[in-house]
Amino acid sequence: MDEANENEKSARENLLRSAAEINGIRIEGYDFDKGVDYSKIIESFASSGAQASEFSKAIDVVNDMIKDDAFIFLGYTSNMISSGNRDIIRWLVKHNKVNALVTTAGGIEEDFIKCLGDFYLGDFRASGKELREKGVNRIGNIFVSNNRYVEFEKWIQPILEELYQESKGKAIIPSELILKLGEKINDERSIYYWAWKNKIPVYCPAITDGALGDNVYFFKFKRDDFVLDIAEDVKRFNDLTIGLKKSGAIVLGAGVVKHAVLNANMLRNGLDYSVYINTALEFDASDSGALPEEAVSWGKIRKNAKSMKVFGDATILFPILVAESFARNQAAG
């Protein structure tokens, strides 16, 4: 056999090897010849591959949480409240669909600030210099006039004074502060109004960050002995997990919110269900990017738990997730 034939034979053997046949879900997307049926489009995610199929599995996990009557922790970063997802979260809290909330300081303050004035759609490419000169703060492509923060200070400072007087020298517990603010805002557009109304606890492990922390800072100029008792709050938060028959978590974003929910559930040997939606990667060994398997190694998620991580933008995915789980279950009665 000459060299050319030998090379062809070798190439064919390498490229055209016989292999095992595969069984399972055939990859196919939605057929628009059948018209526009959004329910069927979402249903087609299951066979689409890539993150669409991971998202379809996440929907199944959330539905399993609901069917199993799990205690559901909803964790979210502040940008979820800056965006329209605030209204999705409010619906869940208003209708008692989740059992505990965990967020950042921005996730608290911006809910109240939105009751005082609106946020507006801007541009990711807007000049920071020009916005600063105009007194406009940018959250991605969401614009907020700095007047909203001035109004927030005017609203919250008298409430801090009232709580200080009522506490009679005792430390204020952050979760109680948040629900008190929910009561005081007295606005049905507020997540924390409904949390107060429905007695759903709200925890904020980083409560001194952001405008809320700024207001605590300013208040301490007047009341130097004002104290927030985060130790009592972490005890109350961790105690929530003890004795739960089933525990589930939906976490939008990452950072301190994700870790707080997982760490608390480590005390009960892990979550039974978990869904992460974020864009963080695991290459730098951060908890933010860690996959559920890492949490299993710590006992934050149980070995036999149903868990999914979806890489994607929660402003797109979370409304669909809620529609295909909590809302669909409510509609079905």
Image (tube, grey):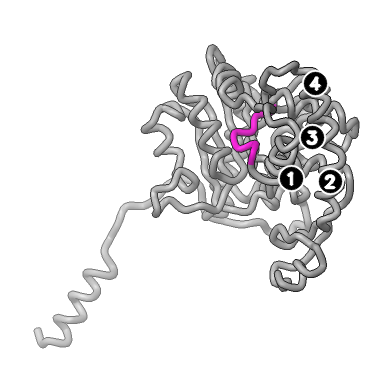
User: Where are the magenta residues, as a range?
Assistant: 202-208
Name which quarter of the figure residue 322 lies in. top right
- Labels 3 & 1 near each other (Cβ < 8 A): yes
Where is 134 relative to 153, above or below?
below
- Labels 1 & 2 near each other (Cβ < 8 A): yes
Question: What residue sits right under mark 2 in the picture?
Answer: 114
The quadrant the N terminus occupies is bottom left
User: Can you tell which mark lies on residue 191?
Assistant: 3
Q: Amino acid at mark 2?
A: Lys
Question: What residue sits right under mark 1 in the picture?
Answer: 81
Choose mark 4 or mark 3, whichever is in front.
4
Q: Amino acid at mark 1?
A: Ile
Q: Amino acid at mark 3?
A: Ile
| Horizontal and vertical percent position of residue 236 | 60, 19
Choose mark 2 or mark 3, whichever is in front.
2
> Looking at the image, which residue is at 39% across and 54% down?
283
Inter-mark Cα distance, 1 to 2: 9 Å
